[in-house]
Amino acid sequence: MGVSLSYVLLVLLLLWPLVESQSGSEFKSARALDALLQDYAYRAFVIPKTGVSFNGVVPKNLTGIKISALRLRGGSMFTRGVPTYKEFRIPTGIIEHPYVERLVLVYQNLGNWSTTYYPLPGYMYLAPMLGLLAYDASDLSAKNLPELDIQASEEAISIHFGQVKPVPDGLKPKCVSLDLHGRVNFTNVVSGNRCSTFKQGHFSIVVKSTAPPAPLPPSTSESVPRPSHEGGGNHSRVWAIVSSAVGGCALLVLLALLVLWIRGYKRRKKMHKMERTADAGEALHMTTVGSSKAPAAMVTRTQPTLESEHAP
Ligand SMILES: *[C@@H]1O[C@H](CO)[C@@H](O)[C@H](O)[C@H]1NC(C)=O
Ligand SMILES: *[C@@H]1O[C@H](CO)[C@@H](O)[C@H](O)[C@H]1NC(C)=O
Ligand SMILES: *[C@@H]1O[C@H](CO)[C@@H](O)[C@H](O)[C@H]1NC(C)=O
Protein backbone atom coordinates (compact mmCIF):
# COMPACT_ATOMS: atom_id res chain seq x y z
CA MET A 1 0.00 0.00 0.00
CA GLY A 2 2.75 2.39 1.08
CA VAL A 3 4.62 1.64 -2.11
CA SER A 4 1.70 2.38 -4.38
CA LEU A 5 1.01 5.62 -2.52
CA SER A 6 4.57 6.78 -3.03
CA TYR A 7 4.25 5.97 -6.72
CA VAL A 8 1.13 8.10 -6.98
CA LEU A 9 3.05 10.93 -5.31
CA LEU A 10 5.93 10.46 -7.71
CA VAL A 11 3.56 10.62 -10.66
CA LEU A 12 2.04 13.84 -9.32
CA LEU A 13 5.50 15.26 -8.76
CA LEU A 14 6.51 14.50 -12.33
CA LEU A 15 3.32 15.88 -13.79
CA TRP A 16 3.22 18.94 -11.55
CA PRO A 17 5.33 21.23 -13.75
CA LEU A 18 2.93 20.53 -16.63
CA VAL A 19 -0.11 21.24 -14.48
CA GLU A 20 1.24 24.28 -12.67
CA SER A 21 1.61 26.61 -15.64
CA GLN A 22 2.54 26.41 -19.27
CA SER A 23 5.68 28.48 -18.77
CA GLY A 24 7.26 27.38 -15.51
CA SER A 25 10.75 28.74 -16.12
CA GLU A 26 9.47 32.15 -17.14
CA PHE A 27 7.33 32.29 -14.05
CA LYS A 28 10.32 31.38 -11.90
CA SER A 29 12.24 34.36 -13.25
CA ALA A 30 9.23 36.57 -12.47
CA ARG A 31 9.24 35.30 -8.88
CA ALA A 32 12.99 35.94 -8.66
CA LEU A 33 12.27 39.48 -9.85
CA ASP A 34 9.65 39.86 -7.08
CA ALA A 35 12.31 38.92 -4.51
CA LEU A 36 14.86 41.31 -6.02
CA LEU A 37 12.35 44.17 -6.15
CA GLN A 38 11.32 43.54 -2.53
CA ASP A 39 14.95 44.00 -1.52
CA TYR A 40 15.38 47.20 -3.59
CA ALA A 41 12.03 48.62 -2.48
CA TYR A 42 12.95 48.11 1.19
CA ARG A 43 16.15 50.09 0.59
CA ALA A 44 13.94 53.12 -0.10
CA PHE A 45 13.18 53.38 3.63
CA VAL A 46 16.03 55.65 4.62
CA ILE A 47 13.86 57.27 7.27
CA PRO A 48 11.08 54.74 7.68
CA LYS A 49 7.83 56.61 8.11
CA THR A 50 4.53 54.84 8.41
CA GLY A 51 1.87 55.70 5.87
CA VAL A 52 4.21 57.48 3.42
CA SER A 53 5.23 55.83 0.18
CA PHE A 54 8.86 55.95 -0.91
CA ASN A 55 10.05 55.42 -4.46
CA GLY A 56 12.87 52.95 -4.77
CA VAL A 57 15.73 52.77 -7.24
CA VAL A 58 16.15 49.58 -9.26
CA PRO A 59 19.56 48.21 -10.32
CA LYS A 60 20.85 49.50 -13.68
CA ASN A 61 20.18 46.21 -15.45
CA LEU A 62 16.44 46.72 -14.80
CA THR A 63 16.11 50.36 -15.89
CA GLY A 64 12.51 51.01 -16.87
CA ILE A 65 10.99 49.30 -13.83
CA LYS A 66 9.53 51.54 -11.13
CA ILE A 67 9.11 50.47 -7.53
CA SER A 68 7.74 51.96 -4.32
CA ALA A 69 7.29 50.86 -0.76
CA LEU A 70 4.61 51.89 1.70
CA ARG A 71 4.74 50.85 5.33
CA LEU A 72 1.49 50.47 7.24
CA ARG A 73 0.26 49.22 10.57
CA GLY A 74 -1.29 45.80 10.17
CA GLY A 75 -4.66 46.79 11.54
CA SER A 76 -4.99 49.89 9.38
CA MET A 77 -5.31 47.72 6.28
CA PHE A 78 -8.61 46.57 7.69
CA THR A 79 -9.89 49.77 9.27
CA ARG A 80 -8.67 52.41 6.81
CA GLY A 81 -7.32 50.89 3.62
CA VAL A 82 -5.20 53.08 1.37
CA PRO A 83 -7.29 55.54 -0.68
CA THR A 84 -4.55 55.92 -3.30
CA TYR A 85 -1.28 54.12 -3.73
CA LYS A 86 -0.10 54.82 -7.28
CA GLU A 87 -2.70 53.15 -9.55
CA PHE A 88 -4.21 51.15 -6.68
CA ARG A 89 -7.27 52.09 -4.60
CA ILE A 90 -7.28 49.88 -1.54
CA PRO A 91 -10.60 49.76 0.32
CA THR A 92 -11.18 48.99 3.98
CA GLY A 93 -11.65 45.38 5.01
CA ILE A 94 -8.32 44.00 3.82
CA ILE A 95 -7.30 40.97 5.86
CA GLU A 96 -3.70 39.80 6.02
CA HIS A 97 -2.41 36.30 6.81
CA PRO A 98 -0.45 35.89 8.92
CA TYR A 99 -1.31 39.01 10.87
CA VAL A 100 1.73 41.23 11.36
CA GLU A 101 2.23 44.36 13.46
CA ARG A 102 3.48 46.33 10.45
CA LEU A 103 3.59 45.47 6.80
CA VAL A 104 5.03 46.91 3.61
CA LEU A 105 3.12 47.12 0.35
CA VAL A 106 5.61 46.89 -2.48
CA TYR A 107 4.44 48.45 -5.73
CA GLN A 108 5.95 47.43 -9.06
CA ASN A 109 5.49 49.00 -12.49
CA LEU A 110 7.31 46.76 -14.92
CA GLY A 111 7.11 49.26 -17.80
CA ASN A 112 8.88 47.98 -20.91
CA TRP A 113 9.87 44.79 -19.06
CA SER A 114 6.28 43.53 -18.81
CA THR A 115 6.49 41.13 -21.74
CA THR A 116 9.97 39.98 -20.71
CA TYR A 117 8.84 38.77 -17.31
CA TYR A 118 5.20 38.02 -18.09
CA PRO A 119 5.02 36.82 -21.68
CA LEU A 120 1.41 36.09 -22.61
CA PRO A 121 1.47 34.29 -25.94
CA GLY A 122 -1.41 35.47 -28.12
CA TYR A 123 -1.91 38.70 -26.20
CA MET A 124 -0.58 42.23 -26.48
CA TYR A 125 -0.11 44.56 -23.52
CA LEU A 126 -2.02 47.84 -23.61
CA ALA A 127 -0.70 48.93 -20.20
CA PRO A 128 2.36 48.07 -18.12
CA MET A 129 2.20 45.13 -15.77
CA LEU A 130 1.67 46.45 -12.23
CA GLY A 131 2.40 44.51 -9.09
CA LEU A 132 1.16 44.89 -5.53
CA LEU A 133 2.73 42.56 -2.97
CA ALA A 134 2.61 42.60 0.84
CA TYR A 135 5.50 41.70 3.15
CA ASP A 136 6.25 41.72 6.85
CA ALA A 137 7.90 45.02 7.88
CA SER A 138 9.52 43.83 11.11
CA ASP A 139 13.00 43.76 9.49
CA LEU A 140 13.56 46.40 6.83
CA SER A 141 16.86 44.89 5.73
CA ALA A 142 15.36 41.44 5.16
CA LYS A 143 15.68 39.72 1.79
CA ASN A 144 13.75 36.84 0.23
CA LEU A 145 10.76 37.49 2.44
CA PRO A 146 7.69 35.40 1.79
CA GLU A 147 4.65 37.42 0.72
CA LEU A 148 1.84 37.85 3.20
CA ASP A 149 -1.51 36.73 1.97
CA ILE A 150 -3.79 39.72 1.62
CA GLN A 151 -7.44 39.38 0.83
CA ALA A 152 -10.16 41.99 0.30
CA SER A 153 -13.14 40.94 2.40
CA GLU A 154 -15.58 43.72 1.51
CA GLU A 155 -14.97 45.70 -1.67
CA ALA A 156 -12.41 44.78 -4.33
CA ILE A 157 -9.10 46.59 -4.69
CA SER A 158 -9.37 48.66 -7.87
CA ILE A 159 -6.61 49.54 -10.29
CA HIS A 160 -6.88 52.70 -12.40
CA PHE A 161 -4.41 52.39 -15.23
CA GLY A 162 -2.95 55.74 -16.27
CA GLN A 163 -2.26 55.53 -19.97
CA VAL A 164 -3.84 52.64 -21.81
CA LYS A 165 -2.76 52.21 -25.43
CA PRO A 166 -5.61 52.60 -27.93
CA VAL A 167 -7.54 49.38 -28.47
CA PRO A 168 -7.16 48.00 -32.01
CA ASP A 169 -10.46 48.08 -33.97
CA GLY A 170 -12.91 45.33 -33.22
CA LEU A 171 -10.99 43.95 -30.24
CA LYS A 172 -12.07 43.85 -26.65
CA PRO A 173 -9.52 44.74 -23.98
CA LYS A 174 -9.31 42.46 -20.95
CA CYS A 175 -7.91 42.84 -17.47
CA VAL A 176 -5.35 40.17 -16.81
CA SER A 177 -4.26 39.17 -13.34
CA LEU A 178 -1.60 36.70 -12.28
CA ASP A 179 -1.52 35.43 -8.75
CA LEU A 180 1.64 34.40 -6.94
CA HIS A 181 1.34 30.84 -8.26
CA GLY A 182 1.25 31.98 -11.87
CA ARG A 183 -2.46 31.40 -12.35
CA VAL A 184 -3.86 33.74 -14.98
CA ASN A 185 -7.34 35.24 -14.84
CA PHE A 186 -9.03 37.43 -17.44
CA THR A 187 -11.85 39.78 -16.45
CA ASN A 188 -13.63 42.69 -18.10
CA VAL A 189 -12.21 46.20 -18.11
CA VAL A 190 -14.45 48.77 -16.44
CA SER A 191 -14.65 52.37 -17.75
CA GLY A 192 -11.88 51.79 -20.26
CA ASN A 193 -9.02 51.67 -17.76
CA ARG A 194 -10.07 49.96 -14.55
CA CYS A 195 -9.55 46.48 -13.23
CA SER A 196 -10.29 44.99 -9.86
CA THR A 197 -8.94 42.26 -7.69
CA PHE A 198 -9.54 40.66 -4.31
CA LYS A 199 -5.95 39.46 -3.96
CA GLN A 200 -2.40 40.69 -4.43
CA GLY A 201 -0.53 39.85 -7.60
CA HIS A 202 0.27 41.37 -10.98
CA PHE A 203 -2.21 43.20 -13.18
CA SER A 204 -2.45 44.70 -16.63
CA ILE A 205 -4.76 45.31 -19.57
CA VAL A 206 -4.27 43.18 -22.66
CA VAL A 207 -5.93 42.49 -25.96
CA LYS A 208 -5.84 39.34 -28.11
CA SER A 209 -3.03 39.82 -30.57
CA THR A 210 -4.23 39.87 -34.15
CA ALA A 211 -1.47 37.56 -35.40
CA PRO A 212 -2.80 35.11 -38.00
CA PRO A 213 -3.21 31.60 -36.54
CA ALA A 214 -1.40 29.94 -39.44
CA PRO A 215 1.53 31.18 -41.55
CA LEU A 216 0.34 33.09 -44.61
CA PRO A 217 1.10 31.63 -48.04
CA PRO A 218 4.25 33.30 -49.36
CA SER A 219 2.51 34.38 -52.59
CA THR A 220 0.71 37.39 -51.04
CA SER A 221 2.42 40.74 -51.46
CA GLU A 222 4.49 41.29 -48.34
CA SER A 223 5.40 44.94 -48.92
CA VAL A 224 3.23 46.04 -46.01
CA PRO A 225 5.14 45.60 -42.74
CA ARG A 226 3.57 42.91 -40.62
CA PRO A 227 2.41 43.90 -37.15
CA SER A 228 5.20 43.50 -34.65
CA HIS A 229 3.24 41.20 -32.38
CA GLU A 230 3.33 38.53 -35.07
CA GLY A 231 6.24 37.09 -33.09
CA GLY A 232 3.80 36.27 -30.31
CA GLY A 233 2.13 33.67 -32.53
CA ASN A 234 5.45 32.04 -33.34
CA HIS A 235 6.33 32.09 -29.69
CA SER A 236 3.16 30.25 -28.72
CA ARG A 237 3.72 27.66 -31.46
CA VAL A 238 7.25 27.08 -30.19
CA TRP A 239 5.81 26.73 -26.72
CA ALA A 240 3.25 24.22 -27.88
CA ILE A 241 5.98 22.11 -29.48
CA VAL A 242 8.30 22.35 -26.48
CA SER A 243 5.59 21.55 -23.97
CA SER A 244 4.31 18.58 -25.95
CA ALA A 245 7.89 17.26 -26.20
CA VAL A 246 8.33 17.67 -22.45
CA GLY A 247 4.97 16.04 -21.84
CA GLY A 248 5.93 13.11 -24.08
CA CYS A 249 9.20 12.57 -22.23
CA ALA A 250 7.43 12.69 -18.86
CA LEU A 251 4.94 10.12 -20.10
CA LEU A 252 7.75 7.80 -21.22
CA VAL A 253 9.48 8.10 -17.86
CA LEU A 254 6.20 7.33 -16.10
CA LEU A 255 5.60 4.30 -18.28
CA ALA A 256 9.10 3.00 -17.57
CA LEU A 257 8.56 3.50 -13.84
CA LEU A 258 5.26 1.69 -14.00
CA VAL A 259 6.84 -1.31 -15.75
CA LEU A 260 9.68 -1.41 -13.20
CA TRP A 261 7.21 -1.19 -10.36
CA ILE A 262 5.03 -4.00 -11.67
CA ARG A 263 8.09 -6.22 -12.07
CA GLY A 264 9.27 -5.39 -8.56
CA TYR A 265 5.83 -6.03 -7.17
CA LYS A 266 5.60 -9.45 -8.79
CA ARG A 267 9.00 -10.41 -7.43
CA ARG A 268 8.14 -9.24 -3.92
CA LYS A 269 4.91 -11.19 -4.01
CA LYS A 270 6.76 -14.34 -5.00
CA MET A 271 9.35 -13.84 -2.24
CA HIS A 272 6.62 -13.30 0.35
CA LYS A 273 5.03 -16.54 -0.71
CA MET A 274 8.32 -18.41 -0.37
CA GLU A 275 8.97 -16.88 3.04
CA ARG A 276 5.57 -17.90 4.25
CA THR A 277 6.15 -21.46 3.05
CA ALA A 278 9.54 -21.53 4.76
CA ASP A 279 8.13 -20.19 8.03
CA ALA A 280 5.42 -22.77 8.06
CA GLY A 281 7.88 -25.60 7.35
CA GLU A 282 10.40 -24.95 10.07
CA ALA A 283 11.09 -22.42 12.77
CA LEU A 284 14.49 -20.98 12.14
CA HIS A 285 16.98 -21.16 14.94
CA MET A 286 18.32 -17.71 15.60
CA THR A 287 21.95 -17.19 16.47
CA THR A 288 23.81 -14.03 17.36
CA VAL A 289 26.16 -12.73 14.68
CA GLY A 290 27.87 -9.62 15.95
CA SER A 291 25.09 -7.54 17.39
CA SER A 292 22.28 -8.78 15.16
CA LYS A 293 20.42 -12.01 15.03
CA ALA A 294 20.45 -14.16 11.95
CA PRO A 295 18.77 -17.41 11.06
CA ALA A 296 21.19 -20.22 11.80
CA ALA A 297 19.35 -23.03 10.05
CA MET A 298 19.79 -21.53 6.61
CA VAL A 299 22.65 -23.75 5.56
CA THR A 300 20.88 -26.94 6.49
CA ARG A 301 17.90 -26.17 4.33
CA THR A 302 17.56 -26.27 0.64
CA GLN A 303 17.34 -22.62 -0.19
CA PRO A 304 14.60 -21.50 -2.49
CA THR A 305 16.07 -19.92 -5.57
CA LEU A 306 14.51 -16.73 -6.81
CA GLU A 307 13.72 -17.38 -10.41
CA SER A 308 13.04 -13.80 -11.19
CA GLU A 309 16.60 -12.86 -10.30
CA HIS A 310 17.95 -15.08 -13.01
CA ALA A 311 15.16 -14.59 -15.47
CA PRO A 312 16.16 -12.51 -18.50
C1 LIG B 1 20.56 42.88 -11.91
O1 LIG B 1 21.55 43.40 -11.04
C2 LIG B 1 21.36 43.03 -9.68
C3 LIG B 1 22.33 43.82 -8.83
O2 LIG B 1 23.57 43.98 -9.46
C4 LIG B 1 21.53 41.52 -9.56
O3 LIG B 1 21.36 41.12 -8.22
C5 LIG B 1 20.47 40.87 -10.41
O4 LIG B 1 20.63 39.48 -10.42
C6 LIG B 1 20.48 41.37 -11.85
N1 LIG B 1 19.25 40.90 -12.46
C7 LIG B 1 19.14 40.55 -13.72
C8 LIG B 1 17.83 40.11 -14.18
O5 LIG B 1 20.08 40.63 -14.48
C1 LIG C 1 13.58 49.49 -21.16
O1 LIG C 1 13.99 50.81 -21.35
C2 LIG C 1 15.28 51.16 -20.79
C3 LIG C 1 15.54 52.61 -21.07
O2 LIG C 1 14.50 53.41 -20.62
C4 LIG C 1 16.36 50.27 -21.38
O3 LIG C 1 17.59 50.55 -20.75
C5 LIG C 1 16.00 48.81 -21.16
O4 LIG C 1 16.94 47.99 -21.80
C6 LIG C 1 14.60 48.52 -21.73
N1 LIG C 1 14.24 47.16 -21.40
C7 LIG C 1 13.86 46.28 -22.31
C8 LIG C 1 13.49 44.93 -21.85
O5 LIG C 1 13.81 46.56 -23.48
C1 LIG D 1 -11.12 35.26 -11.70
O1 LIG D 1 -11.61 36.50 -11.24
C2 LIG D 1 -12.97 36.51 -10.90
C3 LIG D 1 -13.34 37.91 -10.55
O2 LIG D 1 -12.49 38.46 -9.58
C4 LIG D 1 -13.23 35.53 -9.77
O3 LIG D 1 -14.60 35.51 -9.45
C5 LIG D 1 -12.75 34.16 -10.18
O4 LIG D 1 -12.88 33.27 -9.10
C6 LIG D 1 -11.31 34.20 -10.63
N1 LIG D 1 -10.92 32.91 -11.14
C7 LIG D 1 -9.78 32.32 -10.78
C8 LIG D 1 -9.50 31.01 -11.43
O5 LIG D 1 -9.01 32.81 -9.98
Image (cartoon, grey):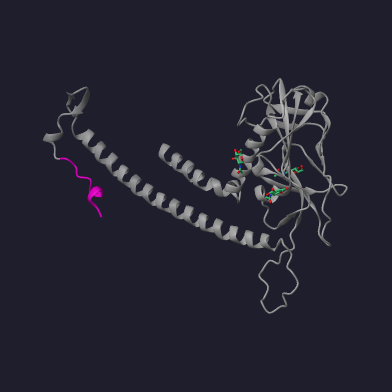
Q: Main secondary structure of the magenta part?
A: loop
Snapshot quadrant of residue 201 = top right
- The extreme left residue here reads 300
Nearer to the camera, 311 or 168: 168
Q: Give percent across and percent down for residue 192.
A: 86, 49
- The extreme top residue here reads 101
Snapshot quadrant of residue 40 = top right
Nearer to the camera, 167 or 198: 167
Nearer to the camera, 217 or 10: 217
Q: Say which residue appears at 57% left-offset and 47% top-offset.
A: 25
Total marks placed:
0
Q: Say which residue appears at 82% left-offset and 48% top-offset.
A: 189
Snapshot quadrant of residue 209 = bottom right
- The extreme bottom residue here reads 219
Q: Give percent across and percent down for residue 23.
A: 60, 50
Q: Say which residue appears at 46% left-offset and 43% top-offset.
A: 10
Q: Say which residue appears at 38% left-offset and 47% top-offset.
A: 261
> What stretch of residues is rendered in magenta?
303-312
Left or right for 47, reference 22: right
**Residue 310 falls within the magenta-colored stretch:** yes
